[in-house]
């Protein structure tokens, strides 16, 4: 009896990735109306509706780079356009944004269609000094700069090169790494690498050191069935230029998510420990599962 060849292993992981992509997209398509914050059937509390819509917009922005001619893509972008052109959406940000209001506004300005409403939100950001580095950590500057550049806004934020050097990717933490630190590292990679779409510009030795750290975190998150973090770390590995399908840690992460995926395509929660019961009504299930399913779909775009 012969062992599994590298080619067979690669084919198996590719099949897992394809299954994840198809399933997540199918589930998102069936549940797209729930992303509408103004739908009477929305299962989300008001303080989470803005976040869900903005997360869908980030996903579609990354998906658009692949130039999709896909019915679901057109449905999602049409829904987002209608949402973003409603004054009530800005009112939701003002009412429920709290400490995240500035962050939500800059995402909105970057991804919403041009309109008087968008210009009013931009004016508020400018008046509040949000586009300056004052009082911002390197991480907060990086997030602001990423979306400010997408919106072609003038700002006085530090360069990507300087911010990268100060970031967790510039000096990766030694294990064991807390979950909060791991998430801060993944989001740093999202902003520097545009969710796997552009080269981060890191020096080769820094990139290699960061990739080793990410693979170590991936091994741990896959072993512990931390599905949401595993998806984000896979995007990070792809953003660093790593060949996810050829990397043992990347393969382990993809297999972990494939095992977690339900027959309907959803990833049932952020982790096995907080897994969502299959008996939940559809709306409550969406509330608990949409984020990780969306992030996993985003991962399949980045890896492909």
Image (tube, rainbow, N blue to C red):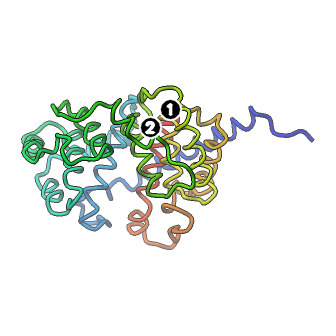
The percent position of residue 224, horizontal first and vertical second, equals 61, 60
Q: Is residue 291 above or below residue 245?
A: below
Of 68 and 60, nearer the camera is: 60
Quick one: label 1, few (<14), some, or many (20+) residues within 10 Å? some
- The residue drawn where x is 41% and y is 54% is 30
Query: Which of the 4 image quarters holds residue 188?
Result: top left
Q: CA distance from mark 1 to mark 2?
A: 6 Å
Q: Is residue 235 above or below residue 197?
A: below
Name the element at disc 2: loop
Query: Which of the 4 image quarters holds residue 71?
Result: top left
Q: Is the Cβ of the residue at disc 1 closer than 8 Å to that at disc 2?
A: yes
**Mark 1 / mark 2, whichever is N-terminal:** 2
Left/right placement of residue 217 relative to residue 159 reads right
What residue sits right under mark 2 in the picture? Answer: 170
Name the element at disc 1: helix
What residue sits right under mark 1 in the picture? Answer: 206
- Quarter containing the N terminus: top right
Left/right placement of residue 233 relative to residue 215 reads left
Q: Is residue 83 visible?
A: no
* Outermost residue to the right: 1
Q: Is residue 261 visible?
A: yes
The percent position of residue 265, horizontal first and vertical second, equals 52, 54
């Amino acid at each position: 009896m012969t062992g599994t060849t590298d080619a067979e292993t690669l084919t198996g992981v590719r099949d897992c990735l394809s299954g994840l992509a198809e399933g997540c997209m199918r589930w998102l398509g069936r549940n797209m109306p729930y992303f509408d914050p103004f739908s009477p059937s929305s299962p989300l509390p008001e303080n989470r509706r803005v976040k869900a819509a903005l997360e869908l917009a980030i996903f579609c922005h990354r998906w658009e780079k692949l130039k999709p001619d896909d019915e679901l893509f057109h449905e999602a972008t049409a829904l987002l356009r209608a949402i973003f052109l409603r004054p009530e959406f800005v009112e939701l940000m003002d009412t429920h944004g709290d400490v995240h209001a500035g962050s939500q506004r800059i995402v909105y300005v970057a991804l919403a269609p041009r309109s008087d409403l968008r210009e009013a939100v931009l004016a508020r950001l400018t008046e509040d000094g949000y586009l300056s580095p004052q009082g911002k950590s390197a991480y907060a500057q990086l997030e602001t700069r990423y979306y400010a550049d997408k919106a072609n806004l003038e700002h006085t934020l530090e360069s990507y090169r300087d911010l990268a050097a100060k970031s967790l990717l510039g000096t990766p933490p030694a294990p064991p790494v807390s979950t909060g630190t791991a998430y801060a590292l993944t989001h740093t990679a999202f902003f520097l690498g545009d969710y796997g779409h552009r080269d981060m510009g890191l020096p080769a030795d820094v990139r290699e050191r960061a990739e080793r750290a990410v693979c170590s975190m991936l091994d741990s998150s896959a072993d512990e069935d931390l599905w949401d973090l595993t998806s984000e770390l896979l995007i990070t590995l792809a953003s660093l230029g790593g060949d996810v399908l050829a990397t043992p840690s990347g393969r382990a992460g993809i297999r972990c998510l494939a095992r977690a995926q339900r027959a309907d395509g959803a990833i049932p929660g952020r982790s096995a420990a907080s897994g969502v019961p299959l008996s939940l009504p559809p709306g409550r299930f969406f509330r608990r599962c949409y984020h990780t399913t969306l992030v996993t779909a985003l991962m399949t775009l980045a890896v492909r």
